[in-house]
Image: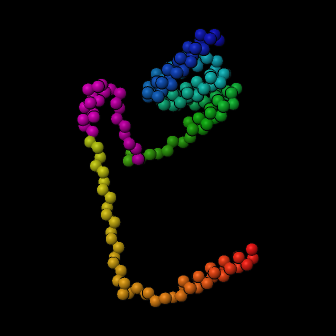
């Protein structure tokens, strides 16, 4: 492998990561596939590229390709890549949970909006009104004539016990 092809692979790899972060998963798959083809697939960098490719496959809803590549990554010479491949394979083969529609929030597709559409969307936005906290109920007033204010000698007993403890500590030291 020449340094020129390695640099081209790194360029494709970075382009794939940027496309993935923008949500252009099909484009990121294409970039990652080109990068893997140009790089040594058994190197650490090649394993990292293939791991990203698995994630892009999954995001692009190409699950069979993602699982097949993960099964190859489990046999990769790089230990870090093998571990990551095993983790991804475990996730990809996990059973799908059933979800209710009320648990999900639908995110509108904004990829078709232009500048005029963005302004239109912003003008339609109505911020949610803050909910005011409910006032706390006031406690019932206490009739002080009903309160037992007679001395129960607890304070005196507590003071005597504290005095004995402190005196015993001073005497023992």
Residue 3's quadrant in the figure? top right
Above or below residue 168? Residue 106 is above
Residue 132: give x, y in percent of width and height: 30, 56
**Position of 90 compared to 133: left or right?**
right
Above or below residue 154? Residue 27 is above
Q: Which residues are magenta?
A: 103-125
Residue 114's quadrant in the figure? top left
**Position of 155 compared to 100: left or right?**
right
Residue 6: give x, y in percent of width and height: 60, 14
Which quadrant of the rendered structure holds the N terminus?
top right
Q: Nearer the viewer, residue 10 or 144?
A: 144
**Position of 64 compared to 126: left or right?**
right
Q: Residue at x 54, y 42 (%)?
A: 95
Residue 106 within the segment the image draws in magenta: yes
Residue 22 in sight:
yes
Q: Nearer the viewer, residue 21 or 107?
A: 21
């Amino acid at each position: 492998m020449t340094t020129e092809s390695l640099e081209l692979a790194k360029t494709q790899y970075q382009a794939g990561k940027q496309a993935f972060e923008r949500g252009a998963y099909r484009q990121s798959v294409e970039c990652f596939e080109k990068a893997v083809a140009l790089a040594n697939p058994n190197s650490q960098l090649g394993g990292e590229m293939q791991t990203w490719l698995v994630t892009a496959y999954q995001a692009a809803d190409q699950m069979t390709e993602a699982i097949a590549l993960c099964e190859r990554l489990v046999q990769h010479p790089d230990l870090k890549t093998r571990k990551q491949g095993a983790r991804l394979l475990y996730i990809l083969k996990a059973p799908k949970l059933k979800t209710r529609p009320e648990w999900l929030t639908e995110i509108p597709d904004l990829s078709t909006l232009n500048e005029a559409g963005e302004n239109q969307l912003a003008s339609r936005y109505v911020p949610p009104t803050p909910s005011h906290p409910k006032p706390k109920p006031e406690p019932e007033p206490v009739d002080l004539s009903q309160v037992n204010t007679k001395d129960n000698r607890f304070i005196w007993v507590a003071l005597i016990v504290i005095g004995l403890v402190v005196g015993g500590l001073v005497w023992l030291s």
